[in-house]
Amino acid sequence: MRRDDLEEPMTQTLTAPVRAEQPRRGNLRTLLMPLALDVAAPMACYYLLHGAFGASEVAALAVSGVIPAVRVIAGIVRDRTLNGLAGLTLAVNVAGIALSFVTGDARMMIAKDSGLSAVLSLAIMLSAFTRQPVMSAGMRPFVTRGTPEREAAWDRLAERSPRFRRAVRLFSGIWGGVLLAECVARLIGAFTLPVSTMVWLSNVMLIAAIVVGLLVAGAFASGPIMGMVRVEARGAR
């Protein structure tokens, strides 16, 4: 339903460390469960309340937004800690619901999600100009596969190769730019298209942005990075 609902589990999966002993089925379940709770369930709830029971768009969006909010709160209680992303997501969700009821405009609930996502996208893109680009932490385990040889190769390249560092920065820059462009498109759609259309179209937009990001980043950043790490690891044998 909400863009950050789909983006958060994806980001958590990309940035989580890869463990050789963790079953692949467990990884798939870890990814799909948040998507089911944060995307499929709220979307079904909205169409059921608004289409079948005649609830207003504001009320239907507000109720459907409770499902992912409860998951965030449950995570905070379970982990006994409040991270910045979870706190920001919860605060923006509550603010969006309140603003929608005050203004009576359901579009505000869709627009506020784009605002949060735009901040996150800008942070990813701007991190490309720092020594620690945000997305490199999630890419590294998939490139090195946890092997000591590739881990060492990554460290050597990060220290000695300007080409490698540019590719790592480009990876975050591409992802930040693609996701920011999707945020702008979604914001425009929020105020020009029917709310019932944007409820499903927003998820289609994000999926399309992810596909574009994977293709572009793979061609210009992660692909060359994998090649450099592979060659460096072989040369050190």
Image (tube, rainbow, N blue to C red):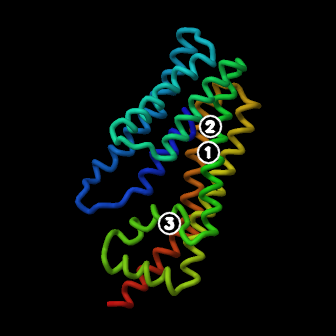
Q: Amino acid at mark 1?
A: Ser
The amino acid type, in three-letter code, at marker 3 is: Ser
Q: Residues within 10 Å of mark 2 (few under 14, many from 20)?
A: many
Q: What secondary structure is found at the residue carrying circle 2?
A: helix
Name which residue lies at 34% across and 45% down.
30
- Which residue carries the number 3 mark? 136
Question: Is 215 located above or below residue 210 in the figure?
Answer: below
Q: Is residue 154 left or right of residue 112?
A: left
Residue linked to disc 1: 117
* Residue beneath the point at 75% across and 38% down: 188
SS for dot 3: helix
**Image quarter for residue 62?**
top right
Please give the name of the residue rendered at 63% of the width and 29% of the height, measured from the top-left corner.
96
Q: Amino acid at mark 2?
A: Asp
Screen quadrant of the N terminus: top right
Q: Which residue is mark 2?
A: 113
Front-lying residue, 182 or 97: 97
Kind of element beneath mark 1? helix
| Spot occupied by residue 142 in the image (x, y as percentages of width and height) | 40, 65
Name the residue located 38 percent from the left edge and 33 percent from the top edge.
Answer: 74
> Spatial distance from mark 1 to mark 3, Cα to Cα?
19 Å
- In which quadrant of the rendered view does residue 112 lie? top right
Q: Is residue 5 left or right of residue 110?
A: left
Residue extending farthest to the left is: 21
Cβ atoms under marks 1 and 3 closer than 8 Å:
no
Residue 128, x across and y down, in percent: 61, 66
Near mark 3 (Cα within 10 A), the count class, few <14, some 14-19 or many ≥20, is many
Q: Is the residue under label 1 in contact with that under label 2 (CB below 8 Å)?
A: yes
Give left or right: position of 74 versus 164: left
Please provide percent x and percent y for residue 166: 60, 76
Quarter that holds the C terminus: bottom left
